[in-house]
Amino acid sequence: MADKKFASHADLEEKQISWDKLSDNAYAYTAEGDPNTGVIIGDDGCMIIDATATPVAAQGVIQKIREITDKPIKYVVLTHYHAVRVLGASGYKNEGLEQIIASHDTWDLIVERGQQDMDSEIGRFPRLFQAVESVPGLTWPTMTFTGEMTVWLGKLEVKIKQVGRGHTKGDTIVYLPSQNICFSGDLVEADAACYTGDAYLADWPQTLDNLAAMKFDKLVPGRGPTLMTPDAVAKGLAYTRDFVSTLYSSAQEAVAQGMDLNATMKHTRSKMDPKFAQVFIYEHCLPFDVTRAHDEASGIRDPRIWTAERDQQMWHELQKV
């Protein structure tokens, strides 16, 4: 009998933390394919981009910041609504937190499916949600925007912008125009699978083109190592485009041939495994990815809500492959 537990349940090894300095103002807290956190240190305060899975995990980020500065951590920006990115936000409340910022589309998704997503993700990622009892509940933005907004950290200009749908409909990037540094959230991955369970796969390549046109010199992806040169940024964008395009085109081919989900999984694996089987969280993501790709290729435009029950049903069904 095949093991019916999520692939992530076998992922119990603590990851090696990297603390990368991109400039005097920008840092990345990364951990071998775990969700990355960005840090911007301005003249009068700091900004966090994506808040880790729990308030306890956020302490690791705070510790790194406090080695450099005692300035208040005024802002947390959520690049999207996924629990693994947002539930640690309350860990900053004693550090000077004034605002939790997200796109209005992200707010709408939290209203519509935040609780189900939280319950679902906690079940998927036991290691990331160690000390889950420290999570006080859903993280609600205190400030939302549509399209684009600017935050000034003293004289340092920080842009927060939606450049298109991809990983979710609320995707947001944060960047420093004066330094050409971007924090992309899960719109871009490096050496890690793209999770596409809530994605708009038909839109994602154009969104990546929009991002590429901004010509960033450095970029912190949602997962994987910091991209520290223009060439590395271009490769990260190309890698992500290849992943989501191969996934979606495989599902389109399968649906056109009338394949069910199991057959679609086999067909997609034949295209994806040779290129991507070795990257972080691939086996965990692929069943969710194929399910969403099959839905979208079948005409289901908006992602269906994942619940803990739906997760289990899908996972068990695809273990028959």
Image: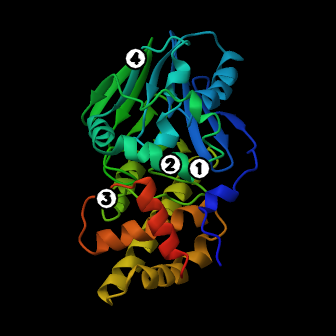
The residue that appears at 37% across and 27% down in the rendered structure is 101
**Residue at label 3?**
303
Residue 59 numbered mark, or none: none
Quadrant assignment, res 157: top left
- Indicate which disc, 2 or 3, sits on the residue closer to the N terminus: 2
* Element carrying mark 2: helix
Write down the residue under mark 1.
Answer: 125
Q: Amino acid at mark 3?
A: Pro
Callout 1–callout 3 Cβ contact below 8 Å = no
The image quarter containing residue 203 is bottom left
Q: In this rendering, which labeled residue sits more in front, label 2 or label 3?
A: 2
Label 2–label 3 contact, CB within 8 A:
no
Q: What type is the residue that disc 2 sits on? A: Glu
Do tag 1 and tag 4 residues touch (Cβ < 8 Å)?
A: no
Residue 121 marker: 2
Distance between the Cα atoms at labels 1 and 4?
35 Å
Asked if residue 213 is positioned above or below residue 39 in the image, the reply reads below
